[in-house]
Image: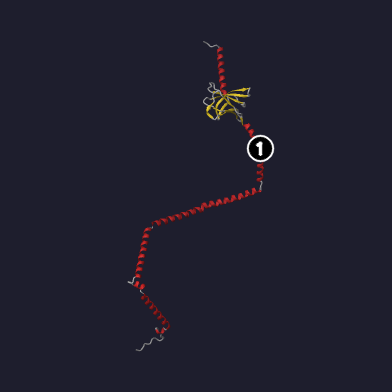
Amino acid sequence: MKISKEIKIALVAVLSAIIVYVGIIFLKGLKLFNDEVSYFVEIADIQGMPTASDVRANGLKVGTVKAITFNPNRQDLTVEITIDPKFQIPQGTSVYMTKEMLGSAMMNLKLGPNPNAVLHPGDTILGEPLMDLMTEAGKVLPQVEAMFPKVDSILNALNTLSHDPAITTSLHNMEAVSADLRTTTTRINGLLGNDVPQLMAKTNTIFNNLETTTNNLNQIDMVGMAQKADATMNGLQEMTFKMNTAMNSKDNSLGMLMNDNSIALHLDSTMLNSSKLLEDFRLHPKRYVHFSLFGRKDKQK
């Protein structure tokens, strides 16, 4: 059975329409077989946001703008958004618009505080005013303008301060101080490089000598020396005891000499006679010594 030319043309037209529809859906960012759930957003201004724009939460794309409807009674807009069913929207969530500097506007979800209580598909979410960077900058501009006189005063004060001669003098003084610091640093470096190593070497030598002396002292038999000293002291004590005993006893010459008064008197008498003899010798030397220039004459018997 042959297909007529009219049927072929009809089939091509239907196929083309299907391709165009699928292409439009694809270009809009919509899914052909949509498994997403819809929510509705009431907002006053969308800033020219087109359909198929992204819907984000904390910077993550979670849905797409499906349709935009104008409400003449309230003079606002109702935006239908489709959200991934795996993403749960907490109650108390709101929507705010953001507009990039060179891009288009987009919707952002400001999630509610309680993730356990969630919205159901088809619920309405309230929108917030547009957060435009230019609008925020316009709010800040008056404050910046109010700061201009203060900035001008500060600049004038800095200009006056920079022409103050005291500043120049201080800078010269700081330069002199910097030069002194460089000189001091050079001397310290020289000290650390030369004198300190020599001092450390001498210190090491002293410590080595002390260590050698300590080792020599450790080798000395201190116990033996102490024992010898004790023996010497005992000998001295014994000798002292014997001398005291001998001096106090009359059985020996030393004891008799020390204890017998007659011997002392005899010695005194002997010393006195010797003194008299010497005195007589001094006064009458001829009685004891005879001198002759011609020789000694023999005495006649």
Residue sticking out furthest to the left: 251
Residue that label 1 marks: 146
Q: Which residue lies furthest to the bottom in this view?
A: 300
Q: Which of 115 and 14 is in front in this view?
A: 115
Q: Quadrant of residue 240?
A: bottom left
Residue found at the far top of this picture: 1
Tag 1: amino acid: Ala
Nearer to us in this view, 292 or 132? 132
The quadrant in which residue 66 appears is top right
Return the x and y of residue 250 as percentages of the image width and height: 33, 72
Can residue 146 be seen here? yes
Residue 117 against residue 153 in the figure, above or below: above
Camera sees residue 221: no
As drawn, is 94 to the left or to the right of 281?
A: right
Q: Where is residue 190 in the image (x, y as percent from the top left)?
A: 53, 52
Quadrant in which the C terminus is drawn: bottom left
Query: Which residue is pictured at 66% across the width and 37% down the height?
Result: 146
All told, the count of numbered labels is 1
Q: Which colour scheme is used?
A: secondary structure
- State the image coordinates of residue 107 (x, y, percent, origin top left): 58, 27
Q: Position of residue 210 (x, y in %)?
A: 44, 56
For label 1, the SS is helix
Quadrant of the rendered image containing residue 140: top right
**Label 1 Cα crowd, 10 Å radius (few <14 / some 14-19 / many 20+):** few
